[in-house]
């Protein structure tokens, strides 16, 4: 009986991993900016006054993409000042642990990865402007999450699951972690910003 459960578990994990790879990314989605209250959009004046933000973002990659957050302050024009990146990915540039991570947990890193801040790779983004108190609370949670997130596994705890934890800590509803990153970020925004 344990052998049968092991095989069934493997089949279920493979099915989830395969399902996540079945759709295709679309062209880059427009940028969206909201206030932390979930209002669909805010004026540029409010964004300039606040200055604190978190941006849920996805980017294209050789695989099915990557989901992560960028957070920090903005200048008066809305540009990022010394942004920080948090995301979950296998802790390697080798393809071997990435492939193994579709079956077994592999060591993970939680910082920036190649292409995260490059506009040409952005596939979807949703920037949420925060008050200083909201920003401080959110960043504290991100730092705790980064410290405890040691493993990546494609169908159990992937980059979408990591970002979903951050979004839930802010009170947002989150979509399935088995969506492609572009779909995940787009659906996250739609579920919470109208």
Image (cartoon, rainbow, N blue to C red):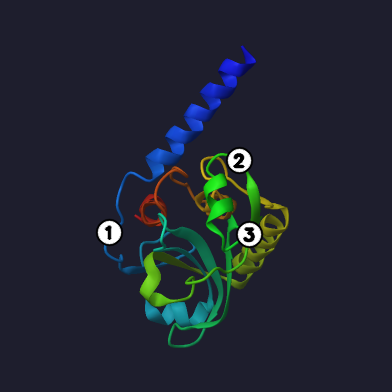
146 in relation to 115, above or below: above
Q: Is residue 107 left or right of residue 184?
A: right
Q: Is residue 153 left or right of residue 189?
A: right
Looking at the image, which residue is at 49% across and 70% down?
A: 116
Mark 3 or 1 closer to N-term?
Answer: 1
Residue position marked by numbered label 1 in the rendering: 26
Q: Check the picture and name the quadrant holding the N terminus.
A: top right
So how many labels did they put on this image? 3
Measured from the top left, where is residue 64 in percent x and y?
A: 40, 54
**For the residues marked 1 and 2, what is the alpha-carbon distance in whole angstroms?**
29 Å
**For the residues marked 3 and 1, what is the alpha-carbon distance in whole angstroms?**
27 Å
Nearer to me, 70 or 129: 70
- In this view, the mark in front (1 or 2): 2
Nearer to me, 110 or 12: 12
Residue 42 visible? The answer is: no
Q: In which quarter of the image is residue 113?
A: bottom right
**For the residues marked 3 and 2, what is the alpha-carbon distance in whole angstroms?**
14 Å
Measured from the top left, where is residue 184 in percent x and y?
A: 41, 52
Q: Residue furthest bottom?
A: 76
Looking at the image, which residue is at 40% across and 61% down?
A: 39
Mark 1 or 2 closer to N-term?
Answer: 1
Residue position marked by numbered label 3 in the rendering: 91
The secondary structure type at the circle numbered 1 is loop
24 in relation to 86, above or below: above
Q: Residues within 10 Å of mark 3 (few under 14, many from 20)?
A: some
Residue position marked by numbered label 2 in the rendering: 104
Q: Residues within 10 Å of mark 2 (few under 14, many from 20)?
A: some
Residue 141 visible? The answer is: yes
Q: How crowded is mark 1: few (under 14 residues within 10 Å), some or many (20 or more)?
A: few
Measured from the top left, where is residue 10 in percent x and y?
A: 53, 29
Q: Check the picture and name the quadrant holding the C terminus.
A: bottom left
């Amino acid at each position: 009986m344990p052998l049968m459960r092991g095989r069934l578990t493997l089949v279920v994990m493979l099915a989830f991993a395969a399902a996540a790879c079945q759709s295709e990314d679309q062209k880059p989605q427009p940028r969206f900016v909201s206030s932390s209250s979930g209002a669909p959009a805010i004026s540029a004046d409010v964004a300039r006054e606040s200055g604190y933000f978190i941006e849920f973002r996805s980017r294209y990659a050789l695989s099915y993409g990557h989901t992560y957050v960028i957070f920090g302050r903005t200048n008066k024009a809305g540009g990022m000042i010394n942004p920080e990146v948090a995301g979950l990915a296998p802790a390697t540039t080798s393809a071997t642990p990435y492939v193994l991570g579709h079956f077994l947990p592999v060591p993970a890193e939680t910082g920036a990865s190649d292409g995260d801040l490059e506009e040409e790779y952005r596939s979807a983004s949703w920037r949420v402007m925060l008050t200083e108190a909201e920003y401080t609370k959110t960043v504290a949670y991100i730092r705790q999450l980064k410290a405890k997130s040691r493993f990546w596994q494609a169908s159990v705890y992937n980059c979408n699951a990591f970002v979903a934890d951050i979004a839930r800590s802010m009170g947002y509803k989150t979509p399935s972690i088995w969506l492609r990153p572009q779909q995940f970020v787009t659906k996250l925004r739609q579920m919470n910003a109208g």
